[in-house]
Amino acid sequence: MRVAALIATIAITGALIAAFTVSLPEIPGLGWTDRNIFFHVPMWFAMYVLMGISFFWSGKYLVRGGELADLRAREAAVGAIFFGVLGLFTGILWSRVTWAEALPDSDPQAWWGWDPKQTFALVALLMYGAYFVLRRSVREAQLRGRLAAVYNIIASILVLPLTFFLPRLIGGLHPGAEGTPAFRSEDISTPHRLLFYLSAVGFIALAVWIWQLRVRLARLEERLTSVQDPLGEAA
């Protein structure tokens, strides 16, 4: 936990200070909004990592069982949704001042233009978020754990094609879509790339740190509940 906290603190602080103080080559059509690359994309990377962690612990729960594995999968999924929502929100703001700069704020198209990658990202988050609805709908712990683990694995697998492969096939305005590949040497400069990688490492470490903290808090809450229940029965 301390390692993740240290990496997150140093990497994010260093990357963001440099991003707003160091002179960077201009990316055509973006201006100062190009600094959002150090927020928006790393948050999606953090989401993917947490989904991978949740996928792993769901698989382990199906193979070996154990409440701890289910808890770790659940808390990783919570973090994944959190960073996914932040990634979607920063993407909406970015598209507002780039793709829809000429539109008034009152126009819904200014905030949501139904770009394929943006839309598929929303679909992926809604589908993944159904994991928590499923958990709340089943009371029996073991059945809930098994059903949630199976759904989590399926949803995790589907997120990648929804947010990566399908948008490339369909195309669109978003970088990374057909005709607008992202992170080529002609798209962003070397300083941009280095700061982006540093920020990505920092946000991934932050995501892991938050996951570890949530697991510890959840285990503490369960212990407190197990102590209080017998006392309540005795009373």
Image (spheres, grey):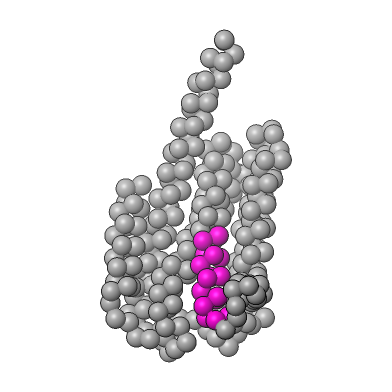
Q: Is residue 30 above or below residue 1?
A: below
Is residue 91 part of the magenta span, yes or no? yes
Q: Is residue 223 visible?
A: yes
Q: Residue 235 lies in what quarter of the image?
A: top right
Front-most of residues 202 and 98? 98
Q: Which residues are magenta?
A: 85-101
Q: Is residue 141 above or below residue 185?
A: above
Front-most of residues 24 and 216? 24
x and y percent of residue 216 in the render? 44, 38
Residue occupying image coordinates x 35% and y 57%: 8
Q: Is residue 231 above or below residue 51?
A: above
Q: Is residue 35 above or below residue 78?
A: below
Q: Residue 107 lies in what quarter of the image?
A: bottom right
Residue occupying image coordinates x 37% and y 77%: 193
Q: Is residue 25 left or right of residue 41?
A: left
Residue occupying image coordinates x 28% and y 77%: 22
Q: Is residue 130 left or right of residue 185?
A: right
x and y percent of residue 48 in the render? 52, 61
Q: How many tags in the picture? A: 0
Q: Is residue 135 left or right of residue 30?
A: right
Front-most of residues 147 and 133? 133
Is residue 133 part of the magenta span, yes or no? no
Residue occupying image coordinates x 58% and y 47%: 58
Magenta stretch prevailing secondary structure: helix
Q: Is residue 47 visible?
A: no
x and y percent of residue 33 in the render? 44, 77
x and y percent of residue 23 in the render? 29, 81
Q: Residue 194 lies in what quarter of the image?
A: bottom left
Q: Residue furthest right?
A: 137
